[in-house]
Image: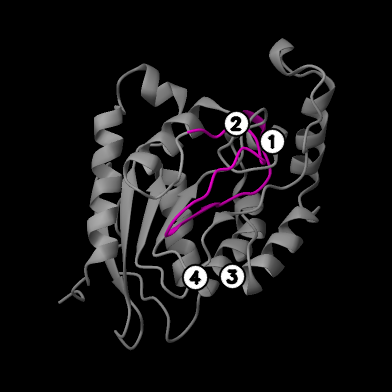
């Protein structure tokens, strides 16, 4: 799908970004020695932009692209097992037209949903530094600002939860006020956050990341993932009351 307006401008800047030398070196170096199953493929090896509906009420936030997933395919959560779990769940909840996520041209469309990440380049060992997070965060801030209908954010993991709160807090006066004490991540945790004038509200929902570490061990099941996106559907379809 082709992003429009402000989202398209963010996308263009993300793809051309070279601000973090360590991440640039890593995302490009993995091309030299890919797993046997990907040998002969042309890797994207650039920052991975967000994906989805510019009018979305649901924003899904991940950590960063996988070295042989998004960094290979050029589409977020595409071509790896985490994405397989995520897109199946989005499809079952009605946020995607299909359950497959194999390549940029496979016909996937998101409906009322936009997917982004806190960091847009694949990091070594899936661990961005705080400086890399802070350098990349303005892209997420600008996407949030452009998603004027955003009502629900599903954060995939504690890093994404923290990044989403940081991005909301960076939107500035008149936008979102972060509650005190700061909401803590947990699977199924929710935090209702109001804009400065309380005219708008967004619900942040925590979800275990669909990484192999969580899915192989049973920490995250498909039923649990469906529960999160079922809840996101309810929240998107209904007005959320502001906090007391």
Q: Residues within 10 Å of mark 3 (few under 14, many from 20)?
A: some
Secondary structure found at label 3: helix
Q: How many marks?
A: 4
Tell me the CA gap for discs 3 and 1. Answer: 24 Å
C-beta proximity under 8 Å, tags 2 and 1:
yes
- Disc 2 target residue: 102
Front position among marks 4 and 3: 4
Q: Mostly what secondary structure, the magenta segment? A: loop
C-beta proximity under 8 Å, tags 4 and 3:
no
- Disc 4 target residue: 147
The correct choice, above or below, for 86 with respect to 147 in the image is above
- Disc 1 target residue: 73
Front position among marks 2 and 4: 2
Tell me the CA gap for discs 2 and 4. Answer: 26 Å
C-beta proximity under 8 Å, tags 2 and 4:
no
- Disc 3 target residue: 142
Span of residues in magenta: 100-125
Residue 165: image quadrant is: bottom left
Sequence-earlier tag: 3 or 1: 1
Front position among marks 2 and 1: 2
- Taking depth in this image into account, of 173 and 78 the one nearest to the observer is 78
C-beta proximity under 8 Å, tags 2 and 3:
no
The correct choice, above or below, for 198 with respect to 31 in the image is below
Percent of width and height locating residue 207: 33, 42
Tell me if I can see residue 107 in this picture: yes
Sequence-earlier tag: 4 or 1: 1
Q: Quadrant of the C terminus?
A: bottom left
Front position among marks 3 and 1: 1
Question: As drawn, which residue projects farthest toward the left?
Answer: 244
């Amino acid at each position: 799908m082709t992003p429009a307006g402000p989202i398209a401008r963010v996308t263009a800047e993300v793809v051309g970004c070279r601000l973090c030398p360590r991440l640039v070196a890593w995302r490009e170096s993995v091309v030299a020695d890919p797993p046997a199953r990907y040998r002969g493929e042309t890797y994207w090896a650039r920052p991975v932009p967000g994906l989805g509906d510019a009018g979305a009420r649901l924003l899904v936030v991940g950590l960063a692209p996988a070295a042989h997933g998004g960094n290979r395919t050029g589409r977020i959560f595409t071509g790896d097992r985490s994405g397989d779990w995520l897109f199946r769940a989005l499809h079952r909840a009605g946020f995607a037209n299909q359950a497959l996520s194999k390549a940029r041209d496979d016909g996937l469309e998101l409906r009322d949903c936009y997917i982004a990440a806190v960091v847009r380049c694949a990091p070594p060992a899936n661990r961005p530094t705080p400086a890399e997070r802070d350098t990349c965060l303005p892209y997420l801030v600008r996407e949030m600002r452009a998603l004027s209908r955003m009502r629900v954010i599903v954060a995939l993991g504690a890093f994404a939860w923290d990044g989403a709160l940081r991005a909301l807090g960076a939107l500035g006066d008149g936008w979102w006020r972060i509650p005190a004490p700061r909401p803590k991540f947990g699977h199924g945790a929710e935090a209702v956050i109001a804009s400065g004038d309380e005219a708008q509200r967004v619900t942040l929902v925590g979800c275990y990341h669909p990484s192999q570490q969580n899915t192989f061990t049973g920490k995250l099941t498909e039923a649990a993932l469906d529960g999160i996106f079922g809840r996101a559907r309810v929240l998107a379809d209904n007005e959320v009351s502001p906090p007391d």
